[in-house]
Each structure stands twice: as C-alpha cells, then as structure tokens.
Amino acid sequence: MIAEPVLMSLATSEGAAWWFNGSLNIIKATTASTGGAFAMIHQTAAPGNATPYHLHHDEDEAFYVLDGEFTFFSDGRKIALGPGGYIFLPRKRPHGIRCTGAAPSSMLVFAMPGGGFAGLVTEAGEPAKELTLPEPAPPDVARLAAACAKFGIGILGPLPD
C-alpha cells in the first residue's frame, strides 16, 4: 500500500544529506513523501566525479542541471548539459554521468517511481557531517554492489569514452 503524499516544504539547505560516490546528495522528496510517485535529490559533484555505467531496472530518471556542467553517456552518445539543461533516461537504458564542469556542479535528480536511487544513496552512502563535498576516497565496491542489487540497479562497468 502506497502512503498518502504529505504537504511539505524544504528550504535550500534542508533535507537528509548524504555523501555518496564522492558527491553531496540532499534528499528533497522521498518516495514516502510523494505517495510513491518519485524521489528528488539535489546532487553536487566535483569536477571529474563520475558514476559507473549502469541501468535501473525499475525506475526512470530525469536530470535538471542547476549550475556547472554534466555529461551524460547513453546509447553511444555523449550529451553535455549546462545550467537549465534537462535529460530524461528511461529505465533499462544503460547510462552514466560525469561532472565536466570546471568547478563543483549541481543538478536535481528525479527518480520515478522512486525508491531505487534514493535507497541506494542511503544504503551505500554515509550521512554527511556537513553540507560540503566529501573527501575523495575510493568506493567500497562490495557495499555498492550489494546496495545496487537490492535496489534494482545493474552496474555495467566504467563509463565509455
């Protein structure tokens, strides 16, 4: 049973903050708060930060770039987006993302119906001690792989060039 959406508002710095995959992620909307419709995360990444090439089995994703630049890799294409840029990536479509801005860049990540990506962030990330980028560190591959399997996300390898 899906919970009823709740009326809520969050200021710029409000929301559960997590360090995940070298980025700062502030969860603005959860699956519970939207009645299962979606989750929304404000993500900030350092130049060069990247996801592995992966796919979501159960959710679609949409991205809206707030500042800086991100390059999206999917279907043999590279699409660089700056402020105001938007891209929709349906479930089961392999993709990956790299921050290609010259400075830390931020975007909104929407996961529909929600649960998978937000769950991954909280399961494989760690609560942010402050609203800054985490210290660079290699990922805990075993923890990431287990969380991806739990939330229906397949890791396919490194990003293509």
Image (tube, rainbow, N blue to C red):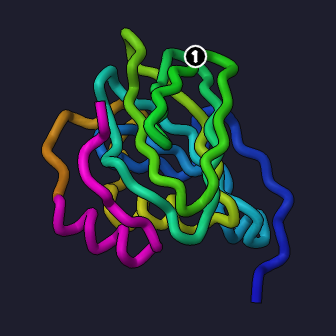
Inspect this view and state whether residue 118 appears: no
Q: Residue at x 78, y 80 (%)?
A: 3
Q: Which residue is at 62% across, 23% downward? A: 66
Residue 92 in picture, x, y percent from top left: 54, 62
Callout count:
1
Give x and y (percent) for residue 94.
46, 52
Quadrant containing the N terminus is bottom right
Residue density around tag 1, few if under 14, some if 14–19, many if 20 or more, within 10 Å: some
**Image: 4 above or below 64:** below
Q: Residue furthest left?
A: 138
Quarter of the view holding residue 140: bottom left
Classify residue 104 as left or right of residue 15.
left
User: Residue 100 at x, y = what percent?
Assistant: 39, 19
Image position of 20 (left or right of 16): left
* Residue farthest toward the top in the current orientation of the protein: 102
> Which image quadrant for residue 120?
bottom left
Identify the secondary structure beneath mark 1: loop
Residue 83 vertical position relative to residue 134 in the rendered view, above or below: above
Residue found 58% across the figure and 46% down from its top: 41
Residue extent of the magenta highlight: 141-161
- Asked if residue 136 can be seen in this view, the reply is yes
- Residue lying at the far bottom of the rendered structure: 1
Quadrant of the snapshot with the C terminus: top left
Residue 67 picture quarter: top right
Q: Amino acid at mark 1?
A: Gly
Q: Which residue is mark 1?
A: 82
- Determine the residue positioned at 17% across, 60% down: 141
Is residue 148 within the magenta segment? yes
**Relative vertical location of residue 145 with respect to residue 89 in this rendering, above or below:** below
